[in-house]
Image (cartoon, rainbow, N blue to C red):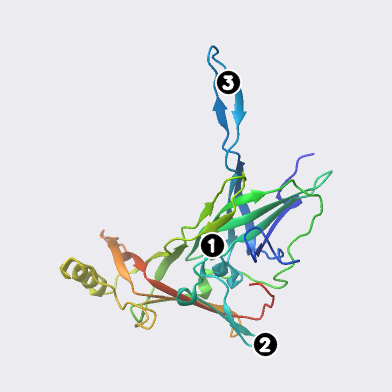
Amino acid sequence: MVRTGAHAYIKYGFETDYGVVASNTVNKSFGLQDKMSSLTLTNNKVNLAKLNQLTVDRYAYGQQSGSASVGFTLSNPWLFGMVLGEPVRTGSSGARVYTYQNSTLNKEVRTIQVEVGIDDSTNMVRTLKGGVVGAVGLSTSVGGMVDCSTDITYGQETAPSTTLGAPSLPSVQSPYTFAHAELTFAGVPVIQCQDVSLNLAQNAELLYGLNSHSAVDAYRKVLDITGSFKASWVNKVLLEHLLDQLLANGTGETIGAGSNAELEFKLTFTKSATESITINCYGLTLNDLGISGLEPVEVLFSDVSFTAQTIKVVANSTMEGENL
């Protein structure tokens, strides 16, 4: 019998140590419409040749490593915990506030464990352990959902089990769409914004050691914060910032550096007074500025891409749960 996505589920949880999770914490949905577009496990096989023959003599096996790509529609703020660590929580009931920021970022990478279940005649449950999220991407455009993506690399996987269990958290969620979004750049609301994207790459890698084919730990590198947006052309301010960078004695220019500087990029998603996500980026530098629509009776648009030094995400949510 042919199996489809209706026979499968995916869920995840944060690990307390590499390859280890607390009981019943692999219970979270990535978001709405979640899909695992790719899942690959390799043993890094080495072909061993032999003198006096042209065929492979035997095989040796190297590092066990796997990769997965997960896409979903934004419905909760927990994805930021994959690259910014555990949030600071305030409030004990009703609407809580979750704050993720790189100024309190743990220097150790926060790993996740992913469960992939397929309901067939015997059932198959794969457990992907010691997963590091290389990057989290977020984007939306006029008429669309807020789309998210994650690239996961994991270093441990044991034999599959047969006990199925779909995600239980969050129990109530609804999608964020373009209509919930508002963008502010350099302290000014960006009017007639057409699309916006943000990418957080922690550049984490797996660490291997002797006496094991599986990874034994993971570590993180520099956090790269990049983004872009497209909006109606307004004035020359951004062009002047870009030109100033070239005139700053070769050292470049950032528009307000540091977490206490003037807010320069603010992307807010608001569903209600108790459900919202606000992303603040500081210490910006413009990568490039493009202009499109220089044609008769066409709309002029600015295409802006930037890099930021620091980030702070503040989420209001009524969804409760431990190990977020």
Q: Quadrant of the N terminus?
A: top right
Q: Amino acid at mark 1?
A: Asp
Q: Amino acid at mark 3?
A: Val
Question: Of tags 2 and 1, which is closer to the observer?
Answer: 2
Q: Residues within 10 Å of mark 3 (few under 14, many from 20)?
A: few
Can you see residue 241? Answer: yes
Question: Of tags 3 and 1, which is closer to the observer?
Answer: 3
Q: Quadrant of the C terminus?
A: bottom right
Name above or below for residue 41 compared with residue 248: above
State the residue at coordinates (69%, 75%).
322
**Residue at the farthest right position:** 121
Of residues 14 and 312, the one nearer the viewer is 14
State the residue at coordinates (68%, 65%).
28
Name above or below for residue 93 compared with residue 53: below
**Element on which disc 2 rests:** loop
Q: Are marks 3 and 2 in contact (CB under 8 Å)?
A: no
The residue at which mark 2 appears reads as 92
**Element on which disc 3 rests:** loop
**Element on which disc 1 rests:** strand
